[in-house]
Image: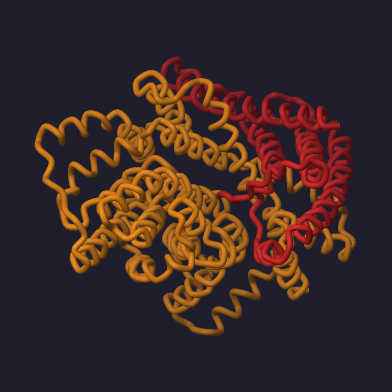
Chain colours: A red, B orange
Amino acid sequence: MERLFNLTSTIVRWICLALLLGLTVIVFAKVLFRYLFNSPLIWSDEVIMLALLALTYFGAALAAESRSHISVEIAENILKRWSTQALKIYHLISDIFIIAILFIVIYFGVNISIYSKSQQTDILLFSYFWVYIVMPVGIVFMILLITRRIYEDWFKTSEVNNNTGRA
Amino acid sequence: MITYLIAGLFGIMLIGLPVAFAMLIIGGGYLIWQDIPLMLIPQFMTEGAMIYVLIAIPLYLFAGAIMNEAGMSHRIIRLCNAVVGHWRGGLALVNVLSSMLFAGMSGEAVADTAGVGSVMIPAMEQDGYDTEFSAAVTVSSAVIGPIIPPSVPMILCAALASTSVGRMFIGGMIPGILFGVFLMVVVYIISYKRSYPTHQKATRKELWVAFKDSILGLFTIVIILGGIFTGIFTPIEAAGVAVVYSFLLGWLVYRAISLRRLPEIALEVTKTTGVIMFIIALAKFYSFILTREQIPQHVIQFLMGLSNDPTVIMVIITLGLFIIGCFLSTTPALMLVVPVLLPLVSEAGYDLVHFFVVVTLALLLGTLTPPVGINLYLVSTISGVPAVRLLRELIPFYLVLIFVILLTLFVPWIVLAPGAFIYG
């Protein structure tokens, strides 16, 4: 179980890393090609947009793992002062609720991917299936990482809990 | 319906679910209620994350993070110290000036608070400043980060209001500089009253060394701002170039970044990007519903009913934004507010850029106030002073920011003149 979670976490990290570095390199290459070689990279825009889309959901999955998503922390702070056990239960309930909602999102996300299979993108002409499937795949990883968080809360003694919201 | 959409959203947020999920749940509930196919959700979630200008967000965050890692804040601080360190309250002034320079490279306040604050607060304490004062100066000057370009909130505004990022950037230029200068004036007065220490004036040689040490780093500002304003780069390209430049600088010249550390920096950036973009994508969905229910029109009618004078309406909006900013951090607040207020801009005859610069400034005040001021809590972690104890020291700085907001509101010229000068 633990190995599966660690593997998921590593995969998400590698994907995020590749996406951000790839994005940077392509944007930089775009400038280079336009000024030095006088031939703009026409395909770059579509790739960049897809990378941003993927970065959004894989990054969001990563953020979910460490509870970094922006939220109003009033309830959490009250519970924290009251008892840690209550906070744990509160986290469990809200996590399960979120996972349930995410399953619905995946279901309709896969549906729309299949539904728009025959449409093609403007420049690179690949099927819209590959555009719409990115989000559900990212969400699958998000669910796995949230599950990991629950697992660590309840079945591991060392608590990893750094929840400072950024942005 | 309005009660369901608004009260429901805030209700779920109050329970403590992340803002993005609150939007998802309330929006999904609405679709079921109205018998609209739920496939709209993944459609909006996909399209909402594919807005071209938003690519600038991870790139500017990345550039800022690399600069921080490369020890740029130390170099800038040394330079500022050589320039203003010998005035009364020297280190406090250095703190503000460094933040202003750092603002030209980073798009958010958090990097600035962490970068400048972790160096300056201990240094100021050692020099005999009160910790509360040091922390208050750090956190309020960090707000300059998202005002002076590049700026993540301004990119968001440009994306939502379909206006040019360059124009939004340049609109924040003078308000940001004014805020910095006024802060320095107030810091000087307070330092004078409490007779905080001065330092010996730096010799020419020291000044030269400090300048030489930081000039390559400061060149990032030239790349970003110069590149955008001369039209050599688009704001997105400038961000990409800045990342590559600052990385090469930190890696090869300053030798402060090891390739081993790069993944760690990058992952922190992707995480922040994920947080911001996830909200953006879902806010796209939620604001579609607000528009479908004609809530912007209701809000506008309500506001127009209060007064006929566009300026008065703007003051009322600004007050409202202060309150919203207290409870929501800048990104979700912008995502909710901009689509609702957008139709008002043409209706009341505001200038788009001016209006949204004021909106951004007003919301930024909220990052300095409880209960959800991100910067406030960050600086209280860095300095070890509880947030509540900072409030008293922050009051003069709140007033400075409010003054700048009102000045920007009543004198559109300071937002529009530089843009008119450059873009014609």
Q: Nearer the viewer, residue B51 or A139?
A: A139
Q: Nearer the viewer, residue B277 or A39?
A: B277
Q: Eyeballing the image, is A43 above or below A50?
A: above
Identify the image quadrant of residue B222: top left
At horizontal 86% and vertical 32% (from top left) the residue drawn is A1
Furthest-top residue in this view: A37
At horizontal 31% and vertical 62% (from top left) the residue drawn is B413
Q: Position of residue B237 (x, y in %)?
A: 47, 32
Q: Position of residue B208 (x, y in %)?
A: 15, 32
Q: Is residue B49 left or right of residue B99?
A: right
**Can residue B424 be spotted in the picture?**
no
Q: Is residue A53 left or right of residue B401?
A: right
Furthest-left residue in this view: B204
At horizontal 88% and vertical 48% (from top left) the residue drawn is A104
Q: Is residue B128 left or right of residue A29?
A: left
**Can residue B156 be spotted in the picture?**
yes
Q: Position of residue A142 (x, y in %)?
A: 77, 40
How many badges with numbers are in the image?
A: 0
Q: Nearer the viewer, residue B78 or A58?
A: B78
At horizontal 81% and vertical 27% (from top left) the residue drawn is A3
Furthest-front residue in this view: A157
Q: Position of residue A159 (x, y in %)?
A: 71, 44
